[in-house]
Image: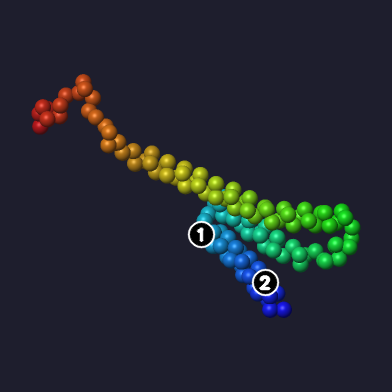
Amino acid sequence: MGNQILYDLLNWGSAALVVAAIVAGVVLTNGMVRTLLAAALLLEVLGQTAHWLVPSSIFFAGDTAVFAYSLAQTILSIAPVVVLVIAAVVGVRQVAAKDAALAALTDETPATWRQPETSPDPRLLAD
């Protein structure tokens, strides 16, 4: 009995941490990343509660029902991770695009710039 309580506490605690982390990501981001994180949150919550949505009598319904239930559980366990990876890639691309746009606005002269050989020495030009 005591082991079951500890198991349930760890199971629901880790699920709560995952959901809280995704919610924090939804709150702190915007645009497409927020949409992808919201989709991952929906899939995660649906995956965590799928066993409540389907009655336990499904295991007596036949092989096809058990296969369909197992397939749905597998998809619901993999899909949030895939969507989170896609959100990370989209986020990195957005940050890189913003960095490139900012770099284009602040086009600085590189430290390796040299005066062309054909131009006059600025020290010899009149004030």
For the point 59% across and 50% down, which residue is it?
A: 85
Residue 68 in view, yes or no: yes
Amino acid type indicated by mark 1:
Leu
Q: Which mark is residue 28?
A: 1
Query: Which mark is first along the chain, 1 or 2?
Result: 2
In front of the other: 16 or 5: 5
**Callout 2–callout 1 Cβ contact below 8 Å:** no
In front of the other: 38 or 20: 20
Q: Is residue 124 left or right of residue 118?
A: left
Q: Is residue 37 left or right of residue 107?
A: right
- The crowding category of the residue bearing disc 2, from other C-alpha atoms within 10 Å (few below 14, some 14 to 19, many at least 20), is few
Find residue 126 and report its image quarter. Answer: top left
Query: x and y percent of residue 79 in the render?
Result: 67, 52
Q: Which mark is residue 7?
A: 2
Of circles 2 and 1, which is in front? 2
Residue 35 in view, yes or no: no
Amino acid type indicated by mark 2:
Tyr
Q: Quadrant of the N terminus?
A: bottom right
Q: CA distance from mark 2 to mark 1?
A: 32 Å
Query: x and y percent of residue 12 in the render?
Result: 65, 69
Query: x and y percent of residue 105 in the render?
Result: 37, 41
For the point 76% across and 67% down, which residue is it?
A: 52
Q: Is residue 29 above or below residue 123?
A: below
For the point 80% across and 64% down, which residue is it?
A: 54
What element does badge 2 sit on? helix
What element does badge 1 sit on? helix
Find residue 48 and report its image quarter. Answer: bottom right
In front of the other: 4 or 57: 4
Query: x and y percent of residue 89 in the render?
Result: 55, 46
